[in-house]
């Protein structure tokens, strides 16, 4: 078995399932256009190798971690410029994660914890942003005209040890600077709310004894754990940009609940197929095979934010 040390970049489209639900053919065309016009030339320019595409994701390998992050920065900057000239329904936004680590090589493919960590980094990136691992940061912190926001150590799925995580700040004014703030004020409040909701929900589920089967047996998975989906929270603010906060709350809730032992939580990709669509609990339960449904809304007015959440069974 061959192994090597390398840098990996993983990019993933934000809200891809929702876009495909609206117009699958156009969404695939937009993705492949970005792949051909953006990812392939930038990858070649920075001496990378496009390993493969994975649905709405892109996996790229680099010999140099500086080249990997430089490529990621230019990809996001160029994508932001292109999106500014497009109507909202044609804007494809990426999250990017970068990791420097050890990989297993099989033919032209690579996999292992090094790739998994890069994937976890992109999940922690903001829409249109970049998140990197601590090993990446240690090698690039003074090499590029960017800044960094430290998120501290994060426990991520399928990785036993916590990983140091940093978000890239693309403003050149912040070059070489690192902020100790874990998140900005809005997203930090959303994350705290997500943890609180997850805690209360789990207490409620335990009190209801969800491990006891009930209801329609046709929607009970063969997995004996209680099953739950966090549906996309509605943005009730007049500012449509607050939709990112609502999506962030949905994703944070999914992540926090997935960490609870004995609870099976449906992936965010599956949940987001129901975004902005009329949905009956019975339909969601049947399509996803879950017993519990969590949904809610977010409303921000001035400096105040109100989050409502409720859980139900079909």
Image (cartoon, rainbow, N blue to C red):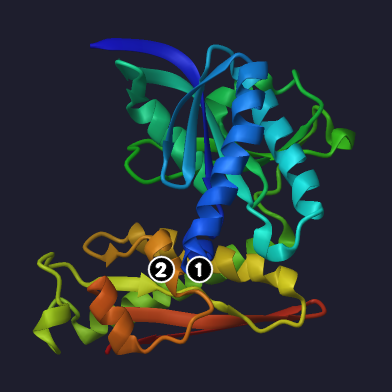
Q: Nearer the viewer, residue 280 or 303?
A: 280
Left or right of residue 266: residue 38: right
Name the secondary structure under disc 2: helix
Q: Position of residue 203 (x, y in %)?
A: 33, 78
Residue at 73% over, 68% down? 241
User: Residue 271: which disc?
Assistant: 2
What number is the disc on residue 24? Answer: none
Tell me, yes or no, whether the two marked residues, 2 and 1, touch with CB atoms within 8 Å: yes
Rendering coords of residue 73 (x, y %): 71, 32
Quadrant the N terminus occupies: top left
Residue 169 drawn at (x, y percent)? 75, 40
**Residue 179 in sight in this render:** no
Q: Tell me the quarter of the picture where residue 246 sits.
A: bottom right
Q: Secondary structure at mark 1?
A: helix
Q: Decide which of 31, 73 is in the foreground and name it.
A: 31
- Using the rendered image of the protein, determine whether residue 129 is visible from the camera's viewpoint: yes
Taking the image as shown, residue 25 lies to the left or right of residue 128, namely left
Inter-mark Cα distance, 2 to 1: 9 Å
The answer to whether 178 is drawn above or below residue 281 in the figure is above
Circle number at residue 250: 1
Q: Residue at x 83, y 29 (%)?
A: 175
Residue 281 in the image: x percent, y percent? 34, 87
Q: Is residue 182 left or right of residue 312?
A: right
């Amino acid at each position: 078995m061959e192994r090597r040390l390398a840098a990996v970049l993983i990019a993933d489209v934000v809200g891809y399932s929702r876009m495909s639900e609206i117009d699958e053919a156009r969404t695939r065309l937009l993705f492949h256009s970005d792949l051909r016009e953006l990812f392939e030339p930038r990858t070649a320019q920075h001496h990378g190798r496009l390993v493969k595409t994975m649905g709405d994701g892109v996996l790229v390998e680099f010999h140099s971690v500086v080249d990997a992050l430089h490529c990621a920065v230019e990809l996001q900057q160029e994508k932001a410029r292109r999106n500014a000239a497009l109507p909202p329904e044609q804007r494809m936004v990426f999250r990017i994660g970068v990791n420097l680590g050890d990989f297993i090589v099989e033919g032209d493919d690579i996999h292992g914890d090094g790739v998994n960590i890069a994937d976890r980094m992109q999940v922690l990136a903001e829409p249109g942003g970049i998140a990197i691992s601590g090993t990446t940061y240690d090698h690039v912190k003074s090499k590029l005209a960017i800044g960094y926001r430290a998120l501290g150590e994060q426990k991520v799925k399928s990785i036993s040890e916590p990983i140091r995580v940093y978000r890239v700040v693309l403003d050149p004014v912040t070059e070489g600077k690192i902020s100790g703030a874990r998140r900005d004020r809005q997203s930090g409040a959303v994350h705290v709310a997500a943890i609180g909701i997850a805690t209360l929900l789990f207490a409620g589920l335990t009190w209801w004894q969800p491990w006891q089967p009930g209801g329609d047996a046709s929607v009970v998975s063969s997995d004996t754990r209680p099953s739950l989906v966090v549906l996309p929270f509605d943005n009730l603010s007049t500012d449509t940009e607050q939709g990112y906060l609502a999506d962030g709350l949905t994703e944070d809730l999914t992540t926090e609940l997935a960490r609870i032992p004995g609870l099976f939580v449906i992936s965010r990709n599956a949940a987001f197929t129901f975004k902005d669509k009329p949905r009956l609990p019975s339909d969601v339960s049947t399509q996803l095979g879950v017993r519990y449904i969590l949904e809610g809304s977010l409303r921000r007015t001035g400096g105040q934010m109100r989050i409502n959440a409720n859980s139900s069974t079909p």
